[in-house]
Image (cartoon, rainbow, N blue to C red):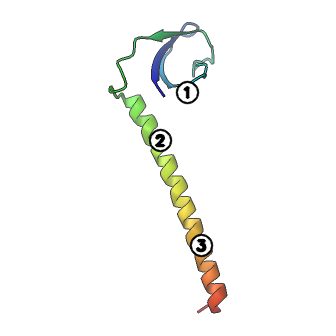
C-alpha cells in the first residue's frame, strides 16, 4: 500500500494518501478528483501527518482489543457468579 503525495488542482491543497490497489484518490478538503500526483520522498520518510495517522490507527486497534478484553472478562465474571452461586 504505497503512500502518494497529491496536490488538488481545484483548491491547491497538498496532502498524502495511503491507497489500496484500484482506489481513486479524492481531495480531503473539497472532494475533487482533479489531482496532480507529486514526487514522493519515499516510504522511509516519515512526516508528522503520517505519524499522527499511524498513531490514530494504533490507538483505534488498541481500544478495540481493550474493549474485547473487558467484554470477555465481564462475561467470565457473570458465568463464574452464575456457576458458583455468587460466592
Residue 42 percent location from the top left of the image: 36, 21
Residue 49 appears left or right of 17: left
Dot 3: within a 10 Å radius of its alpha carbon, few (fewer than 14), some, or many (20 or more) residues?
few
**Residue occupied by mark 3:** 74
Q: Is residue 55 above or below residue 76?
A: above
**Residue occupied by mark 2:** 56
Quadrant location, the C terminus: bottom right
**Residue occupied by mark 1:** 20
Dot 1: within a 10 Å radius of its alpha carbon, few (fewer than 14), some, or many (20 or more) residues?
few
Residue 16 percent location from the top left of the image: 47, 22
Q: Secondary structure at mark 2?
A: helix
Q: Give how far apart the Cα atoms at labels 2 and 3 are.
A: 27 Å
Residue 76 percent location from the top left of the image: 59, 76
Q: Say which mark, if any, is on residue 81.
A: none
Which is closer to the viewer, label 1 or label 2?
A: 1
| Quarter holding residue 80 | bottom right
Q: Secondary structure at mark 1?
A: loop
> Which badge, 1 or 2, is on the more N-terminal residue?
1
> Which badge, 2 or 3, is on the more N-terminal residue?
2
Residue 51 percent location from the top left of the image: 39, 35
Q: Give how far apart the Cα atoms at labels 3 and 1 are.
A: 38 Å
Q: Give how far apart the Cα atoms at labels 1 and 2 are.
A: 19 Å
Residue 83 appears left or right of 50: right
What residue is rendered at 35% in x and 18% in y? Answer: 41
CB under 8 Å between callouts 1 and 2? no
What residue is rendered at 58% in x and 68% in y? Answer: 72
Q: Secondary structure at mark 3?
A: helix
Residue 23 appears left or right of 59: right
| Quarter holding residue 26 | top right
Amino acid at each position: 500500500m504505497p503512500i502518494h503525495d497529491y496536490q488538488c488542482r481545484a483548491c491547491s491543497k497538498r496532502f498524502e494518501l495511503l491507497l489500496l490497489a484500484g482506489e481513486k484518490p479524492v481531495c480531503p478538503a473539497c472532494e475533487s478528483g482533479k489531482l496532480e500526483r507529486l514526487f514522493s520522498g519515499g516510504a522511509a520518510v516519515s512526516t508528522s501527518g503520517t505519524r499522527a495517522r499511524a498513531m490514530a490507527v494504533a490507538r483505534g486497534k488498541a481500544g478495540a482489543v481493550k474493549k474485547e478484553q473487558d467484554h470477555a472478562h465481564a462475561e467470565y465474571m457473570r458465568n463464574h457468579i452464575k456457576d458458583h452461586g455468587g460466592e
